[in-house]
Amino acid sequence: MMSACINFSLIHSSSSPPVTLPQKPFLIHSLTLTNLRKQKQHSFKVLQRDFETLSSSDANDAVSSQNANLEVQFETDPPLLPQINGVVEDRGKSRIRKKKEEEDNNIDDNRFKLRNGREVFEEKAYIVGVERKGDVQDFGIQESLSELEQLADTAGLRVVGSTYQKLASPNPKTYIGSGKVSEIKSAIHALDVETVIFDDELSAGQLRNLEKVFGGDVSLAQMEYQLPRLTKMWTHLERQSGGKVKGMGEKQIEVDKRILRNQIGVLRKELESVRKHRKQYRNRRLSVPVPVVSLVGYTNAGKSTLLNQLTGADVLAEDKLFATLDPTTRRVQMENGKEFLLTDTVGFIQKLPTTLVAAFRATLEEISESSLLVHVVDISHPMAEQQINAVDKVLSELDVSSIPRLMVWNKVDKTSDPQKIRLQAEERDVVCISALSGDGLSEFCNAVNDKLKDSMVWVEALVPFENGDLLSTIHQVGMVEKTEYTEQGTYIKAHVPLRFARLLTPMRQLCVSRN
Ligand SMILES: Nc1nc2c(ncn2[C@@H]2O[C@H](COP(=O)(O)OP(=O)(O)OP(=O)(O)O)[C@@H](O)[C@H]2O)c(=O)[nH]1
Ligand SMILES: [Mg+2]
């Protein structure tokens, strides 16, 4: 029997009728379910495994339980092809996209995916980690690998497998032991792996040795977070400059590799210019007398969503790691008429590669000039506590200890017992919110207001009438408790930020001499 290969995408949602596949068993190469809830081309694999046969009820169950997009590749003998078409299309209220038949030299067509409006080639990746024996770490190997898988997915890779090894410390020559190296080599061949991603930074020697064993067909992403993060950074810069870096259809991974190999220098320069630009912007902003509140937190905690909810800003918020790389600032008006500037920042992550620390810090420079840091936590995440620690660790290295902080537990709606979480939060001076639904946002604003007030100094001053500008500024940035007009000027009692308290110093003396 001659076999042919054909790809279909059955786009199916719970509102469309069930998909019916032909009864005759055929060989299914792969089954991929893609989440449709977001109605974006953002896809993460819910399920991907090989099926010998796939019955229609299997497919229906899988699809209807996930409200998902089912992609099936089947292999069958040619006479069955029209029949498959017929069956699927008969039932064709669910949308059917028949992709073009694969040609021998074009077998990878089905791996071109549209993501955020651009064509991405999904390279097959395999993930490798080391669990250090006796090393008590916040993030266990499973969590670390699953986070890495999510990062790889964000970078447009298709993770086809993963493995790890328990070692006292990574093997200095090959990172993992020789047995494991052979095992991975077999996996590379069996699964057609194109990229092996390591959960740690590899030394030049380890890289060389592994490349030798795995052969030239496989590329190694030695700095795990660099790949997705640089890709994202680059996309961002590309957008900023309006430049075109890649031609449509060019393999995304090729672009990434090219960036990694050749463009890091350019990227650094670009980053530097973005940084300068931001500094100018920041200087301009400093002249606006409104307190700056910065949102910080682990990647995917919901910072951008919170900013969007509060300000209606259209900041990219996605269930992807590192959705935000450039900080964005918006003005928020509270119910009491007071305003603050809210700044979104790049998410934090554990195991940040040393090569990226500088760039990462540059994007975080902003927060050192804030009046308040709001630490947003995804409290529904099983590793929430570890993520809090990871963020605190980065903050402690950033010299921002003097800035007051407010902790916010987000995604309370996603937790199994929101009431319990709320009680725990009350005990800890933490605000509970759901940035997505908007729950708790007025409590959040009140807490911001209180914290800002705490960070200000109490002044009583007599402001001469010719300093009317200063008076209106104080009304804007400070919290004025009392004003009284006298012959010499306006007598004022207020909480004001330190820098304004300084500006008021001569007037405070005036005020003292008045009493
Ligand atoms: N259920 C639920 N989901 C939320 C909530 N807040 C945010 N999300 C989702 O969490 C995902 C991540 O949100 P983002 O706002 O992009 O997270 P971020 O902290 O800005 O992430 P980075 O920019 O990567 O650091 C998105 O899919 C949001 O829709 C919430 O309160 N409840
Ligand atoms: Mg974000």
Image (cartoon, rainbow, N blue to C red):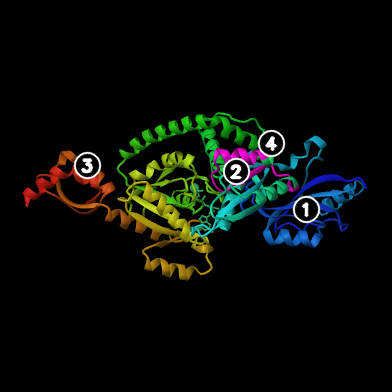
Marks 2 and 1 sit apart, C-alpha to C-alpha, by 33 Å
Residue kind at label 1, given as amino acid type: Lys
Q: Position of residue 405 (x, y in %)?
A: 35, 55
Q: Nearer the viewer, mark 3 or mark 4?
A: 4
For label 4, count other residues whose C-alpha is less than 10 Å away and answer few (under 14), some (14-19) or many (20+): few
Cβ of mark 3 under 8 A from ligand 2: no
Q: Of the two numbered discs 3 and 4 on the same chain, state the one appearing first in sequence.
A: 4
Residue behind mark 4: 216
Cβ of mark 2 under 8 A from ligand 1: no
Residue displayed at 51% across by 63% down: 413
Marks 3 and 1 sit apart, C-alpha to C-alpha, by 67 Å
Q: Of the two numbered discs 4 and 2 on the same chain, state the one appearing first in sequence.
A: 2
Residue behind mark 1: 93
Residue behind mark 2: 155
Report if residue 121 is visible in the image.
Answer: no
Q: Position of residue 460 (x, y in %)?
A: 16, 51
Residue behind mark 3: 470
Q: Secondary structure at mark 2?
A: loop
Q: Are marks 2 and 1 in contact (CB under 8 Å)?
A: no
Q: Nearer the viewer, mark 2 or mark 1?
A: 2
Q: Are marks 3 and 4 in contact (CB under 8 Å)?
A: no
